[in-house]
Image (cartoon, grey):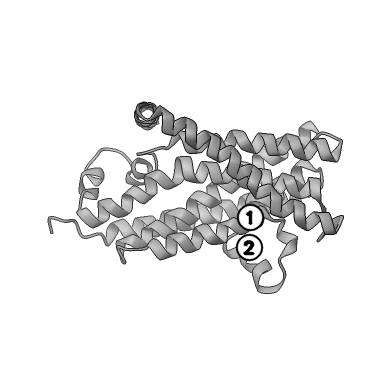
Amino acid sequence: MARHLAVLRANLRLSFLIAMQYRWEFMLDGVMSIGWTAAAIIPLYLVFEERPTIAGWSYGEALLVMGWFTLLDGLLKGAINPSLVTVIEQIRTGTLDFVLLKPADAQFLVSTARFHPWKLLAVGASFAVFGYAYSILGVGPTWSGVAQAVGMLGAGVIVLYSVWIVVISVAFRAVRIDNLRYLFETVFEAGRWPSTVFKGVLSFLFTFVIPLALMTTYPAEALLGRLPWERFLAGWAGALVFAGIARFVWARSIASYTSASS
């Protein structure tokens, strides 16, 4: 554990130093993150301008869902995506061999190899969305609601990371998976909206296959004090199942990997 923490700390420091070499880009990305977050609220505002509630959600409540999406999107683009996308190039060029030879868990190494600190500024923007939402709702969350929401955030991060691991693992079989990546990123955009907006096949897809409901809607419901503990526990059970599947898929992919020297 100490070795893994040392590796994580070193990679975080290196990523931050690289980001500081391009500090103007850092600042520009920060401004753009805030701008994109503000722009993303406009469609939500226009929809709720016509109707006070949609699928049981008011404008202020739906903004909480938007806030959780913004937070997870920042984590995806700043912490998860940079490292795992690098794996695709390592598989293509054969440099993954060097990672596999290191005396540490390969999945951990490839998952923490690279970070984009400026993309993480979207996490800060998400708190501005939360503040705006509560200014409209006129009431703040309870401590128990915050604790439950933070717990669901942990489950959501596990699911998001696990799905991304499975997507990246496809690169061991089909090296070019750009279309699959873009498909997942496009589907993830649906997390901006409460899950009850979707019906039929989409509702099933966003609840069980790619559980966007768990990632963004459940934490919002927790902040509103209306997430049953049964659903909270079911969400965590689902997150652990996804983590197990991701680990299994990764292990099988590594086992079938043919190094560049073979």
Residue at 58% across, 52% down? 239
Which residue bears the numbered disc 1? 191
Q: Say which amino acid is labelled 1.
A: Gly
Which residue bears the numbered disc 2? 206
Few, some or many residues within 10 Å of mark 1 (<14, 14–19, 20+) = many
Query: Of discs 2 and 1, which sits in the foreground?
Result: 1
Q: CA distance from mark 2 to mark 1?
A: 8 Å
Residue 138, image quadrant? top right
Please state, as top left, top right, bottom left or bottom right, where the N terminus lies in the image. Answer: top left
Q: Say which amino acid is labelled 2.
A: Phe
Res 130 seen here? yes
Q: Image check: 36 left or right of 119?
A: right
Look at the picture and state if 9 lies above or below 79: above
Please state, as top left, top right, bottom left or bottom right, where the C terminus lies in the image. Answer: bottom left
Q: Nearer the viewer, residue 66 or 141?
A: 66
Residue 156 lies, in percent from the top left, at 59, 48
Residue 237 lies, in percent from the top left, at 61, 53
